[in-house]
Each structure stands twice: as C-alpha cells, then as structure tokens.
C-alpha cells in the first residue's frame, strides 16, 4: 500500500531540522527558490566536492568557473533566446498566467509536445477554466522565454543579458584556453558546478523544479573520427535500461553498460563510458541502484543537435525524475559559436597519418596586363587575386579590394595554374559528449532513498542513513550533562576534532541523551560520542553507530585515529 | 625603482596559462566579468575550501546556502533599493554614461563623498569634457542603483527581484532556522560563499572591480549585553593598524590585536577576535603579512548602521585595496527585517540571572456592563480588551474587534488593576559581527604576492610560489619522453595519484623537460615528478621541488606516502 504521507513527513523533517527550507519565508516566500540550511548546506558542499573529485580523478578533465550573467549574443548562438520556451496561457478575466500544458494535463498524454494552436484547440474543446477565478476567457497560448533577463551597465551603454540557463556555455567560451591548456591534444574535458536559472511560470514539486538550481556539467571534447573507447568491463553489474521505443530495441532491459554498448543500444562508446561513470557516482553518494534507470530519448524528443541522448532517472516520492542527462551534442555548439562570433579558435587540428598530396587550382595575376590597367592600385589587385579561395567560373568577374572598391577582372588578367601541395592535416570542429547533473534533484533523491522510518520499541523512529562521505557532520559530541567538567571535556574534544582537515563535528547539549541521539539519527550523523562521568576519570568515551545504534567504549586517541583514517567501524 | 611593466606581465601570464581570463572574449568580452580557467578554478576552489575550513573549525559556525535571486521587499528592508547607488553623468551629445566621481577625480580628493549637486557644480566649474566624444554637454548627475534587476514569473504574476549585492541577507533570512539549530543559544554564526553582483557603470582594474564576484561572508549573532570575549594572546605578532583619523588615536601603528583591543582602538572584543582570525586566514592562503594593514573607518565613512568598521587592505599592483570588511552591524539588519516583514521570529531570548517581579497595569472587563451593552458580541469585546498591550489614557476609546468592527468603550466598562508578575527573561534583537571577504580580490593578491621574477642563468624566469594548500595542482607528472614505456608508466602513476582523496595531479608531455619545468613553476605547481629510463628499470622517479629547484630520487611508494602525509619536503 502506498504511503501518501511519507513525502510530507520527509519534507517536514527537512524544514524542521534545517536541511532544505523555502527561501525568504518571513516575506511570504517565493516559489521555486529554496535555501540549504545549517544541515543541508554541508551535505550539498560534500555532494559537489564528491562530484568534482569523481571527474577530477580522470587525468584529462579540469575545472573552470565562469559568470552566471551571460550577454545575449552567446545565448542567441546557443539557441536559448529562440527556443528556451514554455507555452503560457493568460486568463483575460483575472490576469493569471499558467503553463498551457498544465491546463490540459488531464486531456493529453504528452501535452508538452503540443504546438500553441494544438494547445489552444484543446483548451477550447475541453472548456478548461481558470484555476484562479474559474473564468473561461483565455488569450491564445504564447511561448514565454524561460530565461531571467537583466541588463549590464547603464542607459545608453547598457546591454541585454540573461542569467545562464546552463553552465555548459561557459565551457564552450573557454575552448581556446582549454585547447591551449591541454597542448592542442584531444580528448579533454572541462567541468563546472554552479547556479543555473529557469524562470518557471508556476513551479511546483519542491526541489525538483526550481527557478534557481545547482548544476554540475562536464563537456568532453573529442575527435569524432577517433573517439575514446574505454574499458566497460570494470562495471559488470546490471542496471535498468530503456532504449528508444521507436528504435530497434524497444522495451526495458536489465543489462550491463558493456552489453548495452555491444548490442548497439548505446550508440557511442564515450557515451557508454559516461553512463557507467554516472552510475558509479550516484552509488557513491548513496543513491539506491534499484531505483535507477537509464532512458534513451526517442528521436522525436531529442534536442535538435544531439545524436544520442540518455536520461538517468531516479525513483522517489515524485515518481521517476530525470536527474542527469547524457548527450552527444556533436559539433553543434562549437559550430554555432563559430558562425555567430566569427572566431577561428573553436577548432582542433588533426594530423593525417600520412601527409596528403593535393592538386589545386591557383590564380596567378598577369602583371603585364594588371599593371597598366590599374596603375597605382595594381599591387592591391594582385594581392586580392592571390587571396581568392576559389577559381572564378566566368569572366569578367567582380573583385572586392580591402577598402570596398569593386574592380572587374578580365580573362586576360590571370593565368589559372594547377599546383601540387602537401597537406599534413586539417582543422575540424570537435564533438562534445556532455553529462549534465541536477544537483538539487540528486540531493532530494539521496534524502528520499535514505529516509528510513523504523519501529523502535513500539514507536516510530526516523533514521537518515546517509553515507558518511556526504553526511552533514561526521560526528556529534554529547556531554551527558552540560556541567561537572563534562561540558569542558566535550568542548575540548570538539575543538580537537574540528581541527582535523575535512572533518566537521558539532555539539549538542539540549535535553535528554535519548532525544539527542534521535535528532542525530534524523539528520544522518553517522557517529555520536558521549562524554559521561567515567570519561572524566579514565579519558574514555562512548562511540555510538547510527545505523545499528550499537555502542563501544574507546579512549580518545582511538577515536581521533579512527576518525582520521575513516575506520571507526572496525571498533565494532 | 617602480616596475610599471610587472602588472602587465602578471596579467598576461594569468591569461596565457589559463588562471584568470576575460569572459566571453570570442564575442568581444564584457568588462567586469572574468573566468577562472583550467588553472585558476582549482586555486579558487581551494581558497574557498580553506575559508570554509577556517571558520568551520569554530564549533558554533555553520554553512548555509541561499539563492542569488532576491525579491524586492528583502532589499528594501536592507536599504539596498534606496541607498546602493553611484552617481552617474550622461553625455547628451553621445549618450555615453560615466561615473560622475570618476569625471572629477583629478579635481577633488574624495569625489565619491560628493552629493549630486556638488558633483554637478564641479563638472560645470572645471568644464569636464566627455571622455568619449569630447563634448561639454552633460545631464545632471543622477543616482543609479547598482543592482542587477530582473523579474520572477510571467506577466500579471511577475515580481521585481534583484541579484543579491551581498550574501549576508541570506543569513538574516535564515535566522529562525539557525536559532532553532543552535537550540536557542547565542552566540552562533552562519557563513556562506557564492556570487555577489554589482552593476558597475564602468568597471576597471581587472579582478578588483567586478560586476559578478565571489564573496565569503559570516554573520556572527551575539547578545550585545554578553559579547563573546576570546583570548587574543594566541596572536602575539604585530600588524599595521590605522585607527580612525578623527578618533583619539590618529596615526599608523604596528601592534598586536591584543594591544589594539586593550588600548581601546578596537572597540569591541568580538571584532578584535575577527580581525585576528582574518589575519590568520590570509597568511594561511599565502598573503604576505608585510603587505597587510587594518584600517578603521572614520565616522563619516562608516555605513549608517555600523558602530565599528575595519577594512583589511592589501598592497599590490593596484595599491592598497580593501579585501575584507569587518563590521559590527549591531541590531540594524534584524530590526529592519522585523519592521518590514512583521515577523516575530528575529529575536532571541535572554534569561535573567534572577527572575524580576514587575508591577503592571491590567485591564479587566466589567461583565455586568459589557454584557447588556454588546449582547451577543460581549465575549469578543472582553477578549479584545484583555489583549490590549497598553492601558488607554482617555475614555471613551475606540476598540477594534478581530473582524474590523469598531466599538466604543466607556470608563464604566473596565477596571484598571495593578498586578504583580514574575518575569524570567526577555526577547531582544541579537547584534551581528560580520567579516565579509572578497574572494577574487584575495586571489588577485595571492597571485601578486607570490609572483616572483628571478634571474636564472642570465635570463628572466618566473615562479608562482603558491602555498601547496592552494596550488592549482599538487603535482605534475613528466615522462622524459612520451614513448618507450615512459608514457605508460607516467599515466599509471598519474591515475594512482589522482585516486588519492583531495590530490590533483596533471601530466605534461609537451616539448623539452626544461620548458615543462618552467611552465609548472609559472603556474605554481609545488612538485614535479619525472619518469626517465632509470624509472623503467628500478621503479624510482625524480621529485623536483619548485621553490629551490632541487631534485631527489625516490621510489614510488615513497612518493605516494609523502603526498598522502604532506611530507614530501622531508626528503630534501
């Protein structure tokens, strides 16, 4: 039987204990914005650090960090100014604005695929009423751009800009610096974590659909003729895969990534490798493998530029939710930026295995004709002729000089010669494989998958069984009483532990020891250390393990040593 | 003799080697926006981590993380909507916009303190011409708000919002959650790192004046009647202090923080402690103590709400630059948010040492008069009378009932009694001490202070002597030749090193070993490991130390062990 109350109990815990809270609540809040509180921010930092560490262990991936404010031309080239839209319906009666696809959700299976006029027809036909004022008086659905717009500078000198809808464009902008950093050798990758923005019309679903969210993206630049092929046999375990339903393998399969690639379901070797690495990361931060599936986009659903797209979806209280997208973006982004910016720095060089001899036509100016014809401009004309990329097919033809002057070139003014040249390689636009992670959605599912409601002595009891690597605190120090020397000893131990690099401990002196254990279990602290009367006598403390609530007594050096080496468990 | 070229060589190195670069350069760039490239982003992450670790080691400070998009009412309460301005002059002839104080910089010592009309007079009197078109045809200077404005949601339902000018407001918004987290016990602190925004009219000075920047702020909430007093004797070293020139101690002094507090120069004990902790952090990340000074704001310069403000300034190629502000913001922020939001959750409770007996006037409804007068509403009237905070001074008076009805209360309807009550404590607004760090400015000065141009065999040679804790890579692996097995061995070692938690290594196979050492020295990598023919035979490698360029030979286990324990230096 489904437990419809579990989600509200979880959300209430997150708020009460300071993990994730609505933002600006004392001013009534803003939907789609959340805060990570005193417990959640630490979890978030550790998840992000784990992500950076995971990809940083690959020897050709580096981190970069670019602004969130992005000038308009960049987002015209990326397609976001033109295409990053939701359709919106405005109620003439009350002025309320709603996503058109939400209005018709109960009348269509995939309302987000409908065009404006299809949405309009459906709203008319079904007589959909305004959720605010119950009127049936709609303007036609209109696309609304989902970027937050702002403006850089003042008045006459100001420029339109947007808050970035993805961090990826920052990596494309830095391609020239990255290519130099990696000494002109592909493949290499750049990653970035930080804020992304999406001005949702009516965000719902808590941490799943935010207006300001935390992303982590990696752009891996490869030579499409020589894609990196990694060994997939390191990951033999099977996982749920759902190939493109319109492709040759419709259905749902349990298979390893190696099987998925070898059977042709995953089309690109580097995409297969990123799928496997993504699964490894998710398990590292505490996602339940049984609640993971990889779903291939159908042709109709794929972004226009992508040739193979996968969503990694997680099951939780919101149903299946996309948390990672892994896409072969091909040369789309770099080519589009080359076209819009006219930059010549967005290509890579590929050296042929053997230099190639090519015959090509070249134009040679005939000085004895050009000289008398163009007199003092003869030099400019000859130079402009030599720079022509293609041989003209008809004579006379028009030639533009650097200052814009047009001159007419007759057949007698040039000789066409065929020459041999040696070509050792060529410039090409690298392809890009991108895994894009939604950090907030992943954190939501970490919390969901590790939220355990158990029965303890006949009463409900909550444990957040977070992995120690991403727990908000490594340890809580609990003086049995906040007096009699136990208070001072607890604070001395706390100071000593907090001076260890990368270890965060907190102290709790409130109320009964049982309630303090319960609070520590609720926010996922893996270890609790209790200082009691005996501690004052023999310098020993009790170490309690969250997951089985067992306790052992140890001396202080044993505790500190175990914390440093991450081996406290070996005491049990 | 001053070397005017040093800054341009440093800036050029930062760009060439991918530390810090202008953003969106292929589209012509946007002034005031920079990227941290493949080398710089790693330095930035480590500086931020060091900052979090530094304050996180205090046992009552936690991290939080709030949105950059901030709704207008929050920034009305904080004063930013009204007061976060620069004066701007617009040229009528060409439409160019300029900071008015910049236009008159050569005619006044402190042009940023002038009012609009004073600026206007000075521009008129001096006949200042437009820097763009040389016209003398100005509109009057106007205040321009420096926040980036945007709008949340669509059409009728949209709300004005701004990108946060500081991260501090996020901590004030979360005060209720923090107070709960710390079990209603002061003092405690909350810290946050992330983006801040300031829409400069015409940003200059590279990383010093950015439109989007990285901040790190801590708000420390205290009881002003019982401020935390920490031991300052831990920091005996002297530092340059410049007290308020209008105060009792004008001048410049070398003194310890303890001396500065005990002599009354630093007014608040908690402020003194934050000054000392700030100095400790700056030295940890590699700031040269000889280029640090602490300058107290003059009364005229201080923000309206602050009672003791200090700037920590660093000397570098841009002269003395403020990088940290340490302010006693008193109760200003929380009080203002209480007033604007009407929230009752922005106070703390202070228990008196002894409960206090107080006499107070209370109003008692006289039922025998109220009953017949108000009949079925008599209960409501009595209840509203009991809730009155103050005794009315004249009769009859108007009383508002919960539904808005006004009734008139005559003298015969109430008795005024004087009663004893026991009061055990009171609610009050905590005070806030805030250290606010400009991370980009600090990184600029780390780079500046550690950029060494030395003479090596008669040629210029560059070393970035970064502290290992914040170096972009811990180590570079250099196969002498990228073949003959050295290539594979180098990559195996690299993979092994990168799997160590928190260690980042890179490989360099380009060109001669000398040029590769030079590049590693230029970007501040403290250790280089060379794999040569001998390595293939006996599994040993050469370890080279950046700072003295000495080399020792060690086996692989020695290398890995030394890296793990941070003790590679002990080999030398």
Image: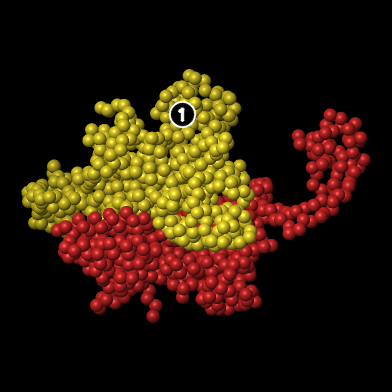
Chain colours: A yellow, B red
Report which quarter residue B350 is drawn in: bottom right
Q: Residue at x 24, y 45 (%)?
A: A230
* Between B22 and A327, the one nearer to me in the picture: A327
Q: Quadrant of the C terminus of chain B?
A: bottom left
**Residue B32 can be seen in this image:** no
Neighbour class for label 1 at 10 Å: few (<14), some, many (≥20)?
many
Q: Residue at x 52, y 58 (%)?
A: A540
Please name the residue that numbered disc 1 is placed on. A101
Taking the view exactly as shown, the residue that stands out farthest to the top is A125
Taking the view exactly as shown, the residue that stands out farthest to the bottom is B1
Q: Quadrant of the N terminus of chain B?
A: bottom left
Q: Position of residue A308 (x, y in %)?
A: 29, 36
Q: Residue at x 55, y 26 (%)?
A: A130
The chain ID associated with circle 1 is A
Label tally = 1
Q: Is residue A78 above or below residue B1?
A: above
């Amino acid at each position: 039987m489904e437990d419809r109350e579990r989600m509200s109990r979880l959300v209430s815990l997150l708020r009460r204990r300071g993990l994730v809270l609505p933002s600006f609540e004392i001013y009534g809040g803003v939907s789609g914005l959340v805060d990570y509180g005193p417990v959640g921010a630490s979890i978030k930092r550790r998840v992000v650090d784990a992500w950076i560490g995971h990809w940083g262990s690959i020897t050709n991936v580096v981190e970069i960090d670019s602004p969130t404010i992005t000038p308009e031309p960049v987002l015209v080239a990326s397609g976001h100014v033109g295409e990053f839209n939701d359709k919106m319906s405005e109620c003439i009666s009350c002025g309320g604005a709603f996503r058109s696809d939400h209005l018709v959700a109960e009348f269509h299976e995939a309302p987000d695929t409908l065009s404006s006029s299809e949405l309009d027809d459906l709203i008319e036909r079904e007589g959909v009423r305004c959720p605010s004022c119950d009127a049936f008086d709609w303007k036609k659905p209109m696309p609304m751009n989902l970027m937050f717009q702002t403006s850089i500078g003042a008045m006459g000198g100001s420029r339109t800009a947007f808050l970035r809808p993805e961090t990826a464009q920052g990596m494309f902008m830095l391609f020239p610096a990255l290519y130099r950093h990696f000494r002109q050798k592909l493949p290499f990758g750049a990653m970035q974590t930080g804020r992304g923005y999406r001005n949702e019309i009516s965000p719902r679903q808590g941490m799943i659909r935010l207006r300001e969210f935390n992303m982590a993206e990696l752009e891996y630049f490869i030579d499409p003729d020589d894609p990196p092929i990694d060994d997939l046999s390191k990951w033999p375990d099977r996982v749920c895969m759902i190939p493109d339903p319109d492709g040759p393998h419709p259905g749902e399969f349990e298979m390893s990534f190696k099987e998925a690639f070898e059977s042709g379901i995953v089309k690109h070797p580097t995409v297969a490798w990123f799928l496997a690495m993504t699964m490894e990361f998710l398990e590292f931060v505490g996602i339940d493998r049984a609640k993971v599936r990889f779903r291939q986009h159908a042709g109709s659903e794929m972004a226009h530029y992508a040739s193979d797209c996968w969503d990694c979806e997680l099951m939780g209280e919101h149903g299946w939710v996309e948390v990672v997208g892994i896409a072969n973006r091909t040369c789309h982004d770099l080519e589009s930026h080359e076209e819009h910016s006219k930059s010549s720095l967005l290509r890579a060089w590929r050296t042929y295995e053997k230099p190639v001899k090519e015959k090509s036509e070249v134009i040679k100016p005939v000085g004895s004709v050009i000289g008398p014809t163009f007199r003092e401009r003869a030099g400019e004309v000859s130079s402009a002729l030599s720079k022509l990329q293609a041989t003209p097919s008809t004579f006379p033809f028009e030639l533009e000089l650097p200052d814009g002057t047009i001159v007419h070139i007759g057949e007698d003014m040039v000789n066409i010669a065929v020459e041999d040249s040696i070509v050792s390689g060529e410039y090409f636009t690298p392809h890009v494989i991108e895994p894009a992670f939604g950090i907030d959605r992943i954190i939501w599912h970490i919390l969901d998958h590790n939220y355990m409601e158990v029965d303890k002595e006949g009463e409900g009891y909550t444990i957040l069984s977070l992995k120690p690597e991403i727990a908000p605190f490594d340890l809580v120090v609990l003086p049995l009483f906040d007096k009699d020397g136990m208070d001072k000893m607890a604070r001395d131990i706390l100071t000593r532990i907090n001076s260890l690099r990368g270890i965060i401990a907190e102290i709790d002196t409130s109320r009964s020891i049982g309630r303090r254990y319960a609070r520590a279990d609720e926010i996922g602290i893996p270890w609790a250390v209790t200082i009691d009367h005996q501690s004052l006598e023999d310098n020993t403390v009790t170490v309690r393990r969250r997951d089985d609530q067992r306790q052992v007594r140890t001396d202080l050096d044993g505790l500190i040593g175990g914390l440093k080496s991450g081996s406290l468990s070996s005491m049990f």
